[in-house]
Image: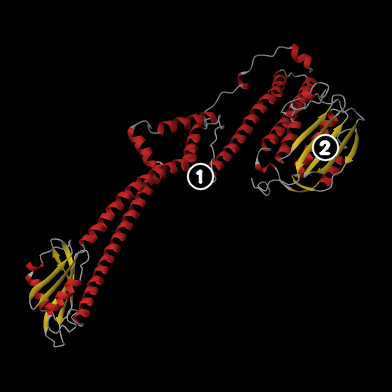
Amino acid sequence: MGASQLTERTAPPARPDLHPKRIAGPPLAGEANAHRSKARGAARPDLRSPISRWRRFGASITTRLLVSYVVLLTISTALTLTVVRQILHTRVDEEIMELLEQEVSEFRRLVGGDDPRTGEPFGKDLDAIFDVYFRRNVPQEGEMVVGIVGDELRHVKRAHDARFPLDRRTDLIAEWARLERPARGEIHTPLGVARYLAVPVVLDGGGETLGAFAVLNFPGFEHAEIDSAMRLAIATGAVVLIVALLFAASMARRVLDPVRQLATTTRTITESDLTRRIAVRGADEVSQLAGNFNEMLDRLETAFGAQRQFVDDAGHELRTPITIVRGHLELLEDDPQQRQETIALVTDELDRMSRIVNDLLMLARSQQPAFLSLDLVDVAEVTEQVHDKATALGDRGWHNERVGRGHILADRQRLTQAIMQLAQNAVDHASSGDRIWIGSAMEGGEARFWVRDEGPGIALDEQDRIFERFARAGDTRRPSTGGAGLGLAIVRAIAEAHHGRVELESIPGAGATFTIVLPVSQPSLLVGEEP
């Protein structure tokens, strides 16, 4: 049954059984995606309500970081100020006791000395000792010095901020007058707590207590100054905390901006749009996360693009053979000879469909990391092997033009496949007996493999287009090869998978030279990479 018979006869209407209806079963991929989208939309809360907005605000990383930062800084500042205040109070108390002991020590030296007015020992004249001491002594801030003769308070000298009527505390004066050994303590007064050190006065070693000497200090003034400084520190700390909070909020927004962009980008990504990317600034961990996410989107976009390309190419290229097969099967008659011719034609179309599918799968896999199996390849060995294999492709004048010396990191089988495809392409477009040259060279850190023919050449405006899928040159270049137009696309895919390229030099009527250029070494990321 010839093609003319097919065009003359009218095909019967389509049979119902050739278009089976969809039966009950699992949903298709598009329907499943639609159902999942509806389910996600139904389960998603209303983000416009005030409660949802507050929940989102409280759940944001920025809010949690700032709250943690404020709590940590507040607690650390409060602990620091509390510890500093306690240390300062303790030091003030220690200094006060040192001052009290210093005053008592000076008084004791005076008791053991001579009266500077007469040059004679004081003897038992306790009033004279007190007169000399109180005349020389200048009380420090918050200090009061007391001299008791017998059981009577006779001498008092105080600083301006220690004006406490001690003479009203007759019980304390009587207690000091009866002392037999030094006594320390504190008393509560309207001016606050006063610490004192009191010692009995015994002259000439007679063992008789003639009076007492006491020094008091009111540390409330020093403590008040400390507390005032602490309040100022608290106010300053609050201002610093606010400034630090604003600065931290700004830094948090800047640092977490890639994360927000990540969330925004993921919400806008669909199966039909994977072009959105995150702006990467800096080199910190969050920026690295954004960069990794962009790389993942690149891989997904490449994978989805390859999938769409495969589906589009398969639908485009398989439509014709499927139509031919279906038309001949619908017109199949009982004549054995016509049946045999139809079976032969259908078989040929099915073989062509199989080749197309295999080529499309090859192109789809070329964009996957596991497409190549890298190993150390001897350039000369590959060149000679390809030459030997190419001689079986057709009756042509095969020549080994040049053999490069060296090794490259490449996939031997894929590289051989690409060069053999160029050789087959040369055979298809060269006449019987025409010469075809195969060669290789190592130049400038690159390996070059070329196939040169004496065919009709390629027009300049077609030299870029012929590497596209299903592209064919003009009628003079491809008269009757019957190919699907995927061969050169596969060659380019293999070269680009090696991080290389394909170069073409051709003048119409003077043949063409196709050159595969590969780097000597591959990026370390691809070496030993597992699928």
Q: Secondary structure at mark 2?
A: strand
Q: Is residue 184 visible?
A: no
Name the disc covering residue 286, or none: 1
Above or below, 228 against 309 in this view is: below
Q: Which image quarter: residue 436? A: top right
Residue type highlighted by circle 1: Val
| Disc on the earlier residue, 2 or 1 | 1
Quadrant location of the N terminus in the rendered image = top right
Display coloring: secondary structure
Residue 408 at x, y percent in the picture = 77, 47
Q: Which image quarter: residue 110? A: bottom left
Nearest to the eye among marks 2 and 1: give it.
1
Residue for point 87% across, 31% down: 453
Question: Mark 2–mark 1 contact, CB under 8 Å?
Answer: no
Name the disc covering residue 461, or none: none
Above or below, 98 against 251 in this view is: below
**Is residue 150 found left or right of 463 in the rendered image?**
left
Residue type highlighted by circle 2: Trp
Residue bearing the label numbered 2: 450
Residue for point 24% across, 74% down: 102
